[in-house]
Amino acid sequence: RGYTVFAIRPGSIAKFNGPEMLENVNRGILWVKEHAKEYQVDPNRLAMLGASAGGHLACMAAVSAADAKSKTRVKAVAVFFPPTDLMNYGGFKIDISGEDQLAQSIRRLITPKGSETIDVSRLDELRTAFSPARLVKPGLPPFLIIHGTADFMVPIQQSRVMVAALQKAEVPVKFIIKEGGGHPWPTIHEEVEQMADWIDGQLK
């Protein structure tokens, strides 16, 4: 469709925590803008895409660049099945002080750099600070969110709460629900085409 695509690798949870990965994403956005002339792209007409954990980071990058003058702000955000609320996951609050895989993953994600342990009293504060659905504010760029009803890793509730937060803040948002869609689904190329159509409408 004539787009130039930059793939930003934020790093994995095995090496980086969430704030570090978000910093890597923002550094990537700045790099693209700084090299826009070299790649013949318009730095003011960028869309940010992501899926699953990448969708979470894309949402975090967007809500943390709410100010219209932010250097990392983009014009549109399109994501597949993103985690958005670490305080309310699938309709209930997870005890992340435990040793199950999900609890450990969330703790690694939110633990401050250089900390071997984390104060239990700060767990809610830290995961709220990394829950984009709880950080939405007016003035954000338009969002497209796509999620399947049979997602076994990220409950569709995670997209629903993000959509509700965006609507409450009067941020333009389109929500596409894939009936029976998992994480992902065999015909996801159809939704990728819908995403491309939506991006056309936002950037052209």
Image (cartoon, rainbow, N blue to C red):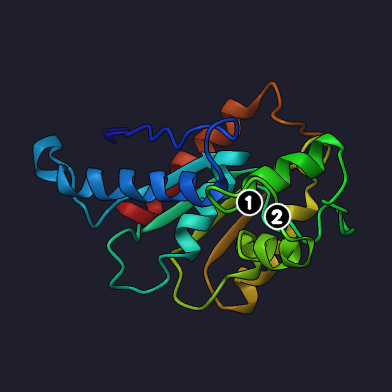
Q: Is residue 179 visible?
A: no
Image mark for residue 111: 1
Q: Is residue 198 visible?
A: yes
Give neighbour class at mark 1: few <14, some 14-19, many 20+ (Cα, 10 Å): many
Residue pointed to by mark 2 = 118
Q: Position of residue 57 (x, y in %)?
A: 53, 48
Give neighbour class at mark 2: few <14, some 14-19, many 20+ (Cα, 10 Å): some
**Residue positioned 66% across, 43% down in the render:** 108
Whether tag 1 and tag 2 are in contact, CB under 8 A, the answer is: yes
**Residue positioned 69% across, 68% down in the render:** 125
Kind of residue indicated by mark 2:
Ile
Name the image quarter holding residue 191: top right
**Residue positioned 48% across, 44% down in the render:** 21
Q: Position of residue 59 (x, y in %)?
A: 53, 55
Q: Position of residue 131 (x, y in %)?
A: 65, 60
150 to 125, vertically: above or below? above
Secondary element at tag 2:
loop
Image mark for residue 59: none
Return the disc, 1 or 2, that comes first in the chain's sequence: 1
From mark 1 to mark 2, how far is it between C-alphas?
7 Å
In this view of the protein, which residue sits in the foreground, 148 or 8? Answer: 8
Kind of residue indicated by mark 1:
Thr
Mark in the foreground, 1 or 2: 2
Q: Is residue 93 left or right of residue 29?
A: right
Q: Is residue 114 left or right of residue 37?
A: right
Q: How many marks?
A: 2
